[in-house]
Each structure stands twice: as structure tokens, then as C-alpha cells.
């Protein structure tokens, strides 16, 4: 066997296995006393991340970059690429520290790349005595299981005997996640310096992680043009298809769903014929969008560069796992189009590094102030960046003296992430296609700029025309726990206003299929909400047909703005309180909620509490406990977003 630059061992037959700590430790003498790329000196930090959208990974990278300012050698590690059962062997490295940036996905679930680590923590009884750690969790308070993964990791590592060197940090994405992280690490680093016995410093400096290599003579077949893993994987598609090897699904149908109004709701059908992709009703489809071409061109013009220059950004740390910030070699155009997030508001670390390129002292001071942890700086950052939604182009346009080199900008910007959508079809009925229901996001920001949702506007342009090749969408399927009951006879109560109806279209299709197979199907009740009957009652014809066929036993629709007083799905729930309580309490019904987490999901939850109190005779505390138990048993499921 031989070693590759990545964190796996490649066997001669082409298969791969994960590195484990013991392998690395065994090879210390032959690898200059390296452990995970860390010099086995007196100070070593390894930062693991559990990330679904890239933010936790970005925070991990920032912590390692900060460590360099204290002379501490560190590295970032994806727990999916390592045998985490070897974590106890960290104690064999003098003065080592493990930091965990752990995001919570969905309803208290670990992210995909942290699933194996989570499973290990649940099952192991290995002692972690002698291992030192700290945890920062990323969550959202609009969800019932706020920061569950960060909290569990912190608690479980301590239970296994590891020593916590700093308090658990909890970031709230419904508030200001960036500010929470800045505040936490502002106190974290003094604790780390005390642990390592080094002097803390308030001085900050910009540290480059990658060096630029410009290719003047290169075979363009060896240049990445949007692929996420294997070069030319979009030209030569090979299963299995996953996050690093998405399938280019042709768009079979792209139609507008709503009949009027200012919004654009659409239904897309992706052809997965021949891909061997399998899915279940309730799963999510992940799509990899492209940034808006005019936006990319404007960035190139503002920075005064040839976007078609072929470049590689090479990690200055030769021991690092991650050799490049995105697939290289590539062009600036491909990087800004496919790999980098150029539409989100900039984080404080990016503003700080950009400040050195502002020639105007006032503009430099603005950037530096927003990057500091003072109350004045936080307030300025919140108003000027967060509330005003300034992305990189807006910052460059509003600070004329700011002229950063494009290669450093490409190093600083976060990666463009996949977007996840609830699948609006059943594989029992549509085995060769995946349906998506989305609303196009477009509005004007406080600065007067038009913000366009990256993925939804990109999907909107995937128009199918006769005589032309069908447009394609890079995608893969992410499994979900949002599932119909095992028994078709179990009643289901579905609540999904707006595009929250998506997974229920799959559920209803599957119930229709079960009925056709001669199975006894239980009651299926749908509560749907929209603004106006004549504008955005999406899937109206299909739903009414399902109701006529007896697949949907009840269809309740709340038209919020068709009358003087707004009516929402939670109001309709209380109108059927007696029947709903009977189904839930006596018939083992399963409840499903899909849509907005901040308002709708909470209001629906509160409505069920009221039903339990009014019809079931429970106290408020008993009602809360009752539905909490339903959630634990999998009888109250949520697929919500904030």
C-alpha cells in the first residue's frame, strides 16, 4: 500500500480505508514525528468539524488560522475521514488539544460527515482520560432540538473522562451566529494560551494559507470546470452518486405552479434514469447551483482581472490534508461560478483580511472596526453587513479604495454549498424521476440592490425547450427520517403550508399506490395554507383528485389573505380538534409538519398543545410532555427550515 495526500490509505486494488490514529502514531519516526500533519512538539491543536452547509468547516479553519498567531501548530480534520475510535490515543501526544465545531442538522441530528463519530460516542465505553477538548456548537433556536449535537459532544466527551479546557460555546443562526462565534473564541484563546503556557496577544495579522500558481501552458482537459471530485466526472458519469460525485440529472419538466401574484413558485422534475439513484418519499434532494453569470462578470470587472486565467491555490502547509481550497487547477471564472459563495454577507474574518487592501484610511478603519469584538464594532457589522446584506461585490462597490488581489479573495470566500429540497414525489409512482417544489427568492435589500436566491433563480432558468438539449442539474439524494408509518393503515396528519407541501405530495402519491395494491390505508388528512385561492393554491387539481379518490380523506386549506382576518393552518387544526385528538390519542396517528420553523411550526405545535388541553383534559405541562413523547417515538415529525 502507499500513502496519498488525502487522509486515506489507497490500496493497490484501488480501494480506500480511513487513517486511524494508531497508524499515524506507528509511523511517527518515518514522518518527522508528525501526527495528523501536526508536528509532535509541545503545542498541537486538531479541530474536527461536523458541517452540513460549510459554516462549521469554515469556523474550524478560522480557529486553526488563529492558532498560528500564537505559534501553535494546528490542523482541520473531517471526522468522516478518520477512525474516531482512535481518539483516546491523542493523550500519547504531549500537550495536544482536540476542538470540535459541531453543527446540528434537522431535528437534532448529526451532520452527514459526523454521523459515524456520533454513533461511536453513543456506543463506546473507551476512556478518554488524558484527552483535552473544547466544543463550539452551531444551531438555531427556532428548532426544538437547539444545538443538540454540540451539547451532546461536550457532555459525552466529559462523561468518557476527557478534560474540558473551556466552556461549551453555542451559536444561534436565528440570531447572529458570527457574533456568537467571535464572542466565544475571544475568550477561548486566552484559555488555550494558559493551557499551552504561551503568552496571549491581542495583535492580529493577516496570514495567507495558500499561494498562487498561474498556469501559462496547461492542457484544458486537466482543468476543473465545476466538478466537485474526480476531474471530468461531469463528462464521464459513474455511479455511485453522492456529495462528491453528483449526478447530472436532465430537467424533464419545469412549470410555474401559481396562477398569479408577485411570486414565482415552480415544479421541476429531474430525470434519474440509468443513475441507479434510489429514494424514498420524505428524502431530500441536494442540488449544486451556479452563481449568476452577470454577477461573476461584474466581480471580474471590479477587480480588473482576466477571469479565464488558469490558476492553482496551493496550501503553504505541506503537511495539511487540504491541499487546495477548491478543486485545482481551475480558472477564476470557474471558481467564482461553481466553487465560491459570492452572494452571502461577508464574515468578520474576511473583512479583517480585506482591510489591508483599502488605500483610504477611513475605509480601512471601517473594515477593521467591524472585524473587532468591541460593542461598537459588532453594532456596525450588524447594521452595515448583516442587516444590509452586503455581499463581496456590494462591499467592493461601496468601498472604492478596496482593491484586493483576486487570489486572496478566492482564498477567503467560503465554498458554495449544495441546497437541499424536500422531494415532492414517491419512488413507488415515479421511480425514474425526482420532483421538486420551490419558490424563487428575489427581493430588494436595504441598500437598494436586488438580491436573487442563488439556487432558485438558477433552477428557474432551467427551461425545457423542444429541439434543444435538456438542461441538467448536479444532484444527489440525502436520506431523511421523515417517513410514512410502516403500516399503511396508520392514520397520518400532514401540515404543510406553501412549499412545505412538497414531501406530502410524495406521501399522498405513495398512499394512492398502496391503495391500488389493495392495502388497507388509514385516514390521510392534509392541512395546506397559501395566500389566495386564485393565485397560489398549488397542486390544487392533483389534491382535489386525491380527495375525490378517497386517498386524501380530508383536505383543509387556509387562504390567509382572502378575508379580513388572516387564517392559517393552526386555526384550521383547532376547528377539527375533537377528531384530531381521537386520531392522535386513540388511533396512533402520526403527525408531520413541513415548512417555516420560526413561526408556523411553533404555532402548529402550540395548537396541538391547546387541543390536548381542551379535548384531552391535560394540563399545559402534561400536554407539552405528551407531544414530546410523540416526537421521541417518531410519531411527531418535522421537516422545517428557518
Image (cartoon, helix red, strand yellow):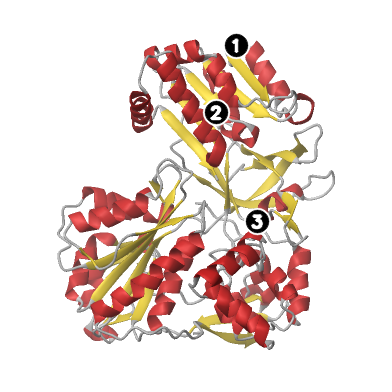
Image check: 147 left or right of 357?
left
The first of marks 2 and 1 along the sequence is 2
The first of marks 3 and 2 along the sequence is 3
Viewer-side label of 3, 2? 3
Residue 160 in picture, x, y percent from top left: 18, 56
Q: In the rendered image of this protein, does residue 243 appear above or below residue 19?
A: above
Mark 2 residue element: loop
Residue occupying image coordinates x 58% and y 30%: 496
Q: Is residue 408 visible?
A: no
Looking at the image, which is closer to me, 454 or 236? Answer: 454
Report how far apart the C-alphas of labels 1 and 3 lie in the structure: 39 Å
Report how far apart the C-alphas of labels 3 and 2 lie in the structure: 28 Å
Q: Which residue is mark 2?
A: 428
Numbered tag placed on residue 39 in the rendering = none
Report how far apart the C-alphas of labels 2 and 1 lie in the structure: 19 Å
Q: Which residue is mark 1?
A: 550
* Crowd band around label 1 with a 10 angstrom C-alpha radius: few (<14), some (14–19), many (20+): some
Asked if the residues shown at circle 1 and circle 3 are in contact, with their CB atoms under 8 angstroms apart, the answer is no
Q: Is residue 630 visible?
A: yes
Q: Quadrant of residue 508?
A: top right
* Crowd band around label 3 with a 10 angstrom C-alpha radius: few (<14), some (14–19), many (20+): many
Residue 406 in picture, x, y percent from top left: 66, 80
Q: Which residue is mark 3?
A: 289
Q: Quarter of the image containing the C terminus?
A: top right
Amino acid at each position: 500500500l502507499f500513502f496519498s495526500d488525502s487522509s486515506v490509505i489507497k490500496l493497490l486494488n484501488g480501494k480506500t480505508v480511513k487513517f486511524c490514529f494508531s497508524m499515524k502514531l506507528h509511523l511517527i519516526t518515518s514522518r518527522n514525528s508528525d501526527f495528523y500533519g501536526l508536528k509532535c512538539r509541545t503545542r498541537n491543536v486538531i479541530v474536527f468539524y461536523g458541517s452540513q452547509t460549510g459554516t462549521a468547516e469554515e469556523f474550524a479553519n478560522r480557529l486553526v488560522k488563529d492558532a498560528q498567531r500564537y505559534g501553535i501548530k494546528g490542523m482541520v480534520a473531517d471526522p468522516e475521514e478518520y477512525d474516531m475510535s482512535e481518539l483516546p490515543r491523542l493523550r500519547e501526544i504531549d500537550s495536544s488539544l482536540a476542538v470540535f465545531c459541531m453543527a446540528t442538522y434537522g431535528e437534532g441530528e448529526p451532520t452527514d460527515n459526523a454521523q459515524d463519530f456520533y454513533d461511536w460516542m453513543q456506543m463506546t465505553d473507551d476512556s478518554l482520560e488524558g484527552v483535552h477538548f473544547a466544543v463550539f456548537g452551531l444551531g438555531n433556536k427556532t428548532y426544538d432540538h437547539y444545538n443538540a449535537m454540540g451539547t451532546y459532544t461536550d457532555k459525552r466527551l466529559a462523561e468518557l473522562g476527557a478534560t474540558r479546557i473551556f466552556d461549551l460555546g453555542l451559536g444561534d443562526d436565528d440570531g447572529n451566529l458570527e457574533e456568537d462565534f467571535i464572542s466565544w473564541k475571544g475568550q477561548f484563546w486566552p484559555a488555550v494560551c494558559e493551557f499551552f503556557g504561551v503568552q496571549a496577544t491581542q495583535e492580529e495579522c493577516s496570514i495567507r494559507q495558500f499561494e498562487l500558481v498561474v498556469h501559462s501552458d496547461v492542457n484544458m482537459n486537466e482543468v476543473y470546470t465545476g466538478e466537485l471530485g474526480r476531474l471530468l466526472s461531469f463528462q464521464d458519469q459513474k455511479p455511485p452518486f453522492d456529495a462528491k460525485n453528483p449526478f447530472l440529472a436532465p430537467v424533464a419538466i419545469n412549470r410555474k405552479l401559481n396562477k398569479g401574484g408577485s411570486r414565482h413558485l415552480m415544479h421541476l422534475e429531474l430525470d434519474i434514469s440509468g443513475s441507479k439513484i434510489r429514494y424514498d418519499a420524505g428524502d431530500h434532494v441536494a442540488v449544486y447551483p451556479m452563481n449568476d453569470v452577470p454577477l461573476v462578470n461584474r466581480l471580474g470587472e471590479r477587480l480588473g482581472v482576466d477571469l479565464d486565467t488558469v490558476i492553482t491555490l496551493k496550501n503553504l502547509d505541506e503537511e495539511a490534508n487540504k491541499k487546495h481550497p477548491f478543486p485545482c487547477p481551475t480558472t477564476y471564472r470557474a471558481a467564482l461560478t461553481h466553487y465560491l459563495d459570492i452572494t452571502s454577507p461577508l464574515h468578520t474574518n474576511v473583512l479583517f483580511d480585506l482591510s489591508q487592501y483599502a488605500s483610504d484610511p477611513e475605509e480601512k478603519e471601517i473594515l477593521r472596526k467591524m472585524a473587532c469584538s468591541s460593542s461598537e464594532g459588532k453594532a456596525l457589522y450588524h447594521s452595515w453587513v448583516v442587516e444590509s446584506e452586503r455581499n463581496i461585490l456590494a462591499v467592493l462597490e461601496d468601498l472604492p479604495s478596496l482593491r484586493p488581489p483576486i487570489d486572496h479573495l478566492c482564498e477567503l470566500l467560503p465554498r458554495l454549498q449544495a441546497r437541499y429540497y424536500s422531494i415532492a414525489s414517491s419512488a413507488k409512482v415515479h421511480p425514474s424521476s425526482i420532483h421538486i417544489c420551490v419558490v424563487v427568492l428575489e427581493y430588494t435589500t436595504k441598500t437598494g440592490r436586488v438580491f436573487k436566491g442563488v439556487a432558485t433563480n438558477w433552477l428557474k432558468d432551467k427551461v425545457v425547450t423542444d429541439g434543444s438539449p435538456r438542461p441538467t442539474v448536479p444532484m444527489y439524494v440525502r436520506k431523511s427520517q421523515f417517513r410514512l408509518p410502516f403500516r399503511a393503515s396508520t392514520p397520518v396528519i400532514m401540515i404543510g403550508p406553501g412549499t412545505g407541501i412538497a414531501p406530502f405530495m410524495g406521501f399522498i402519491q405513495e398512499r394512492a399506490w398502496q391503495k391500488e395494491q389493495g392495502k388497507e390505508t388509514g385516514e390521510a388528512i392534509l392541512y395546506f395554507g397559501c395566500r389566495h385561492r386564485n393565485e397560489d393554491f398549488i397542486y390544487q387539481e392533483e389534491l382535489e383528485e386525491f380527495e375525490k379518490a378517497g386517498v386524501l380523506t380530508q383536505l383543509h386549506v387556509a387562504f390567509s389573505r382572502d378575508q379580513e382576518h388572516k387564517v392559517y393552518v393552526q386555526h384550521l387544526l383547532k376547528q377539527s380538534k375533537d377528531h384530531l385528538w381521537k386520531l392522535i390519542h386513540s388511533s396512533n396517528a402520526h403527525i408531520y409538519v413541513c415548512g417555516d420553523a420560526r413561526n408556523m411550526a411553533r404555532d402548529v405545535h402550540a395548537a396541538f398543545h391547546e387541543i390536548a388541553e381542551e379535548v384531552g383534559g391535560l394540563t399545559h405541562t402534561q400536554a407539552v410532555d405528551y407531544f414530546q413523547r410523540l416526537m421521541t417515538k417518531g410519531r411527531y415529525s418535522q421537516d422545517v427550515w428557518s
